[in-house]
Image (cartoon, rainbow, N blue to C red):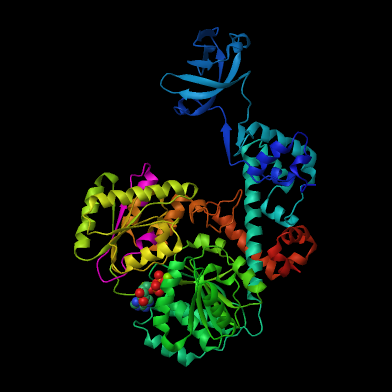
Amino acid sequence: MLSDAVTQLKGVGEKLAEDLALINIYTIGDLLFYFPYRYDVVEIKPLRELIHDDKVTIEGRVVHQPSLTFYGKKKSRLTFTVEVEQVAVKAVMFNRAFAKKHIDVGETITLTGKWDAHRLQITVSNYKKGPAKEEAIIQPFYSVKGHLTTVKLKKLIQIAMNEYGAQIEEILPESYLYSYKLPNRRNAVKIMHFPKNRIHLKHARRRFTYEEFLLFQLKMQLLRKMHREATKGNAQQYDVVKIKEFIHKLPFTLTNAQETSLKQILTDMKSPYRMNRLLQGDVGSGKTAVAAISLYASITANKQGALMVPTEILAEQHYQSLVELFGANANIALLTGSVKGKKRRELVKAIEDHEINLVIGTHALIQDDVFFDDLGLAIIDEQHRFGVEQRRILRDKGLHPDVLFMTATPIPRTLAITAFGDMDVSVIDEMPSGRKEIKTYWTKANTFDRVLNFIQKQINVGEQAYVICPLIEESDKLDIQDAVDLYEQLQAFYPPEVKIGLMHGRLPTDEKEAIMKEFATNDIQILVSTTVVEVGVNVPNATIMVIYDAERFGLSQLHQLRGRVGRGENQSYCILIADPKGEVGKERMRIMTETNDGFQLSEEDLKLRGPGDFFGKKQSGLPEFKVADMVHDYRALETARKDAAEIIEQNALQEADFQTLRNYLEQDESLQETLD
Ligand code: ADP
Ligand code: MG
C-alpha cells in the first residue's frame, strides 16, 4: 500500500530512511509524491544561441584525435576538436583519461558541459557517443538532504513507481479530467518524475496545480460552512443605545472604513452564526478602536470578551489603553504569563464567575486554565495563521464565541482568498485624517554617521529613535550579536547623556518590559532592537525608525516597522540602510520610499518575491503547495475556487463520481465533522 513505510522498499534500510525523513518522506506515497523542484531541459541549440557560462549540450563530429596531458598528482586533461555547424569547437575533459580510447575521429558525439562563448570551448561534464536524441531531454532536480543523493532518490522513485505505481488512485471526478483535459493521477505522477517531453510535463503540472487548489479550496470552504453553522444562544443581544454613547465619547469620530467594518462585525454578532471574520487594516488605521467597540457590544449583551495579542508587552499596552477607554464600563483584567500564584487564581476565578467581563492576554490565554462563564467575542490580534487551531481550542472548552482576527499585514487579494478562504474579511482601507506622512529615505551603509548625527539632532529637540537590526530565524544567536555590536557602536558614538537601550528576543520578559517602559517614558532615547518591536508597540514620541540591513526584510515587514513611528504630532522619518545587490532589492527599497500604502506594498512584495516569502516562512500559515504557485497560477486558483463552491453548494460530494475525492478529504481530521 502507498501508506507502507519506505523501508518496505528493497534497499531502504534504517540509515536511508533517516535521510528520507529529513525531507519528510516516510511512506511509499510520500516518496512517489516527492516532486522535483525544477527541471533542466537539455536540447541542442544553434551555436549562436548558446549563452556564455551556461550548461549546454552540443552535437558534433570529432575531427582530431584527442590529446591527453597529465599534470599534478593523478590529474589529466583530454582535449579534442569537434566540428559543429562547420565551426571548430574545442572540447576539454578533465580527469577522464580513459575516454581517450572511446573517442574516434570521424564519429558523431554529443557533449554536455559548460560553454565558453569567447573561446568556442566546452568543458565537458558528460558525453555520449552518437547523435543527440531528437527530442529534448528533461532532467528533474530534487532537493535532498543528509547522505541522500539525487541519483539514489531517483532510483528509489523508479523502484517505487514499478512496484506501487498501479496503486495510485484517481481522486478527481472523471468528468473534470475530461473537461479540463488533465492526465490521470497515476500518469501525472510518472510524468512528474520521468517527463518525456515538455508538453507532457506541462499537463502533469497543470493537473497537480488544479488538484492542489481544488483540495485546498474545498477544505477552506467546508470549514467556512462549518463555522457558519448556526449555534443557539450565539445571537448577541447587545444594547445599541449604549454602544452609540460609547462611540460618542471617543476622542475622535470613526472613519467611514471603521464604521463599515464595525457594522459588519456587529451584524455577525447579532446573528446566530458564529462570526469568523478577519479585520485587515494598515498600521494605525484604527483597528483597535473597532475592536474595543465590538468588545463593548458583547459586554452590553451580558457576555464576556477576550482580546488576545502576541506578546506580553502588547497585552500590557492594550490593557492600559482599554482601561482608559472603558472607564467604569467594564471590569477588565490583564492575564499574562507573568501573573502568577494567588493573584492568578483569583483572576481566573473572577473570570469564571463573570465578575470580569473583559480579559486581555497573550494568545496562550485560551489554552491555559482559564474558563469563561459566557464568552461572547474573542478577538485575536496579529495572527496570520488560520483560525482553525484557536477555534478548536475554544470548542474543546465548550465555547462558541464570535471570533475576530485582526492583522496589520495587508494581504494582497490574490493571497487573501487563498490564505483566508474560510473567513469573511473586513478591510479598513482609510487612515484617520490629519496624519502626517512618514518620510522614508534609503541610504547606503557608508553614510551611517550622517544618520547618527540626524538622530542626535532629533534627540536634541526631545524626540526618540528606534534602530532595528534584522533577526533571521536560523541564526538568531548571531543576530543578537549584530544587535549587541550595533548597540556598542552607538554607545561609543553618542555622549553619555544619550541613553540607549538594547532589546532582543532572548531577554527575559520582565527585562523587555522594563526597557520598553523606559523607552515609553523617554528615559531611553534610542532603542536598539531586533524585530521584537514589530507589532503594535506604541510610543508616539518616537519619530525616527532606522532599519539596518533593510534588504533582509520583506516589504510588509518594513512597513510594519515603519508604522512604529508617525504616531504623534511630529514629523516622523524612516531611514532604510541597505546595500542590496540585485535589481529586485533596489526596486524594493525604492518602492518603500515611494509609498506609505500597505496594500500597495504587499502587492509589490508578492510580485517581487513570490508567495513563499510573503509572510516569512515561519508564521506563514499559508498552505505549502508542491506544484501550484499562487501568483503564477492565479487563474487555476480562481477556477478551483468556483468548482469547490459548486461542489459544496450542490452537495456533490455525496455523488458516486465524487466518492474518491470525498474519501480523500475525509483523511483530514478537521473536516470529518462537516463531511459526516
Ligand atoms: P491599529 O490598531 O489599526 O494600529 P489603533 O486603533 O491603535 O490602530 O489606532 C491608532 C491611533 O489612532 C490611536 O492612537 C487611536 O486612538 C487613533 N485613532 C483611531 N481611530 C481614529 C479616528 N477615527 N480618528 C482619529 N484617530 C483615531
Ligand atoms: Mg493595533
Q: Residue 433: x percent and y percent?
A: 31, 75
Q: Residue 613: x percent and y percent?
A: 49, 51
Q: Residue 392: x percent and y percent?
A: 64, 69
Answer left or right for 517 relative to 56: left
Residue 322's image quarter? Answer: bottom left
Residue 399 drawn above or below residue 488: below
Q: Is residue 575 magenta?
A: yes
Q: Which region shows up in magenta?
A: 559-588
Residue 236's image quarter? Answer: bottom right
Observer-nearest of 655 and 239: 239
Q: Residue 220: x percent and y percent?
A: 62, 64
Q: Can you name the residue that lies furthest to the bottom here?
A: 241
Q: Is residue 624 magenta?
A: no
- Quadrant including the C terminus: bottom right
Residue 369, visible in the rendered structure: yes
Answer left or right for 373 relative to 477: right
Observer-nearest of 317 and 119: 317
Q: Can you name the residue that lies furthest to the front here?
A: 342
Residue at (33%, 44%) from the top-left corner? 579
Residue at (64%, 85%) from the top-left corner? 233
Please tell me in which quarter of the rendered image ligand 2 is found: bottom left
Residue 428, visible in the rendered structure: no
